[in-house]
Amino acid sequence: EVQLVESGGGSVQAGGSLRLSCTAGAFKFHDTDMGWYRQAPGNACELVSAIGSDGSTYYKDSVKGRFTISQANPKNTVYLQMNSLKPEDTAVYYCAPTPHPAHIPTMSTDACKPGTLDGWGQGTQVTVSS
């Protein structure tokens, strides 16, 4: 059974924008901290952005000022508005639970732990051309 459904990916030129959506399927957000991960070919999975159940947010340094995470009320959809896209943003983007945003900067790495994305969704492809 599908837990989360990601959508909104596509192909854009550098400088363009996309808005990703993550909708609850069988999984119910309730008070879960949620976020977006991405994985490019040959690269490790990394945490890009997170939003806490209290509304606090986290952004990876390379996307600060360009990406904005938000959550619909009721809490059944998480969005990632991506502006000023760069070729290095090209990846498959996945939605999944995350650590609380306040804890993420204390982590030694933003790489995904094994199994982080297992069983959640299929992801959505974002391709940015130069």
Image (cartoon, rainbow, N blue to C red):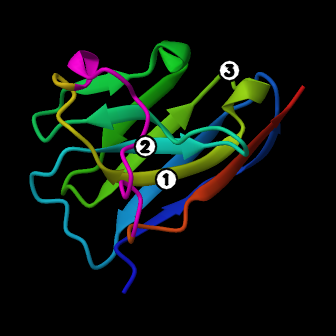
Find the distance from the CA under tag 2 to the CA under tag 1. 6 Å
Residues drawn in magenta: 104-118
On whether residue 113 falls in the magenta region, the answer is yes
The residue that disc 1 covers is 94
Q: Amino acid at mark 1?
A: Tyr
Q: Is residue 30 left or right of residue 43?
A: left
Q: Are marks 2 and 1 in contact (CB under 8 Å)?
A: yes
Quadrant in the rendering for residue 62: top right
Q: Amino acid at mark 3?
A: Ser
Decide: is 67 above or below 8.
above
> What is the crowding at mark 1: few (fewer than 14 residues within 10 Å), some, or many (at least 20)?
many
SS for dot 1: strand
Quadrant in the rendering for residue 47: top left
- Position of residue 27 measured from the top left corner of the image (x, y, whole percent): 24, 72
> What is the crowding at mark 3: few (fewer than 14 residues within 10 Å), some, or many (at least 20)?
some
Q: Main secondary structure of the magenta part?
A: loop
Residue at the spot 20% in from the left edge and 55% down from the top edge: 75
- Residue 84 is marked as 3
- Select label 3 or label 1 by which is in front: 1
Q: Are marks 3 and 2 in contact (CB under 8 Å)?
A: no
- Position of residue 117 measured from the top left corner of the image (x, y, whole percent): 41, 58
* Nearer to me, 108 or 105: 108
- Position of residue 54 measured from the top left corner of the image (x, y, whole percent): 10, 34
- Select label 3 or label 2 by which is in front: 2
Find the distance from the CA under tag 3 to the CA under tag 1. 20 Å
Find the distance from the CA under tag 3 to the CA under tag 2. 17 Å
On whether residue 125 falls in the magenta region, the answer is no
First along the sequence among labels 3 and 1: 3
First along the sequence among labels 3 and 2: 2
